[in-house]
Amino acid sequence: MQEAFEEVSPQVRLHLASDGVEALAFLRRQGEFADAPRPDLVLLDLNLPRKSGLEVLAEVRGDAGLCALPVMVLSTSDARHDVKRAYELGVNAYMLKPRDLAGFFERVRLIEQFWLSAVRLPDR
């Protein structure tokens, strides 16, 4: 995904978290992330260590300072219960991860065209 963003939308700054706990610390600007920028869009994997993507999503939606952030799940899971639960928790979109590099490039184009060009996002 990072490689695809660098190729398709080099102006986009990605910030990566290694697990769900780190993702929440980044979003909440805690500890080493005190000066972290507020993202325009959160791309969330469901299969995160330490705290799952669904747990992260639930905490983001329950946090008054984060609840307006657009969140898009990118997952390998096409399981109905994962999709349903993500929408119940307030995800803005759920997209399947492609299996090949060309698919990643196409997904990034779609994300860039829709989320970063076509829609009006909340002010940071």
Image (cartoon, rainbow, N blue to C red):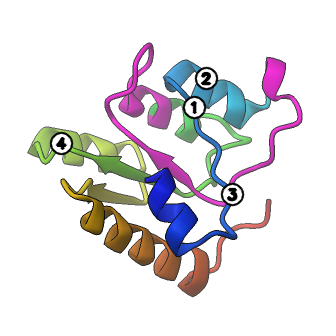
Looking at the picture, how far across and down is residue 104, in whole percent?
33, 62
Q: Secondary structure at mark 2?
A: helix
Asked if the residues shown at circle 1 and circle 2 are in contact, with their CB atoms under 8 angstroms apart, the answer is yes
Q: Residues within 10 Å of mark 3 (few under 14, many from 20)?
A: few
Asked if the residues shown at circle 1 and circle 4 are in contact, with their CB atoms under 8 angstroms apart, the answer is no
Residue occupied by mark 3: 13
Disc on res. 17: 1
CA–CA distance in space, label 1 to label 3: 13 Å
Residue occupied by mark 4: 77
CA–CA distance in space, label 2 to label 3: 18 Å
Magenta span includes 44: yes
CA–CA distance in space, label 4 to label 3: 26 Å
Q: Secondary structure at mark 1?
A: loop
Q: Residues within 10 Å of mark 4 (few under 14, many from 20)?
A: some
Q: Residues within 10 Å of mark 1 (few under 14, many from 20)?
A: some
Mark 2 vs 3, N-terminal side: 3
Magenta span includes 96: no
Name the residue at the right extreme: 35
Q: Amino acid at mark 4?
A: Ser
Disc on res. 102: none
**Rendered residue at 40%/32% (across/down):** 53
Residue occupied by mark 2: 22
Q: Amino acid at mark 2?
A: Glu
Magenta segment boundaries in residue numbering:
30-57
Looking at the picture, how far across and down is residue 47, in whole percent?
32, 29
Q: Amino acid at mark 1?
A: Ala
Q: Locate the C terminus and report the quarter of the image it occupies.
A: bottom right
Looking at the picture, how far across and down is residue 94, in whole percent?
31, 56
Q: Amino acid at mark 3?
A: Arg
Which of pointers 1 and 4 indicates the residue nearer the eye? 1
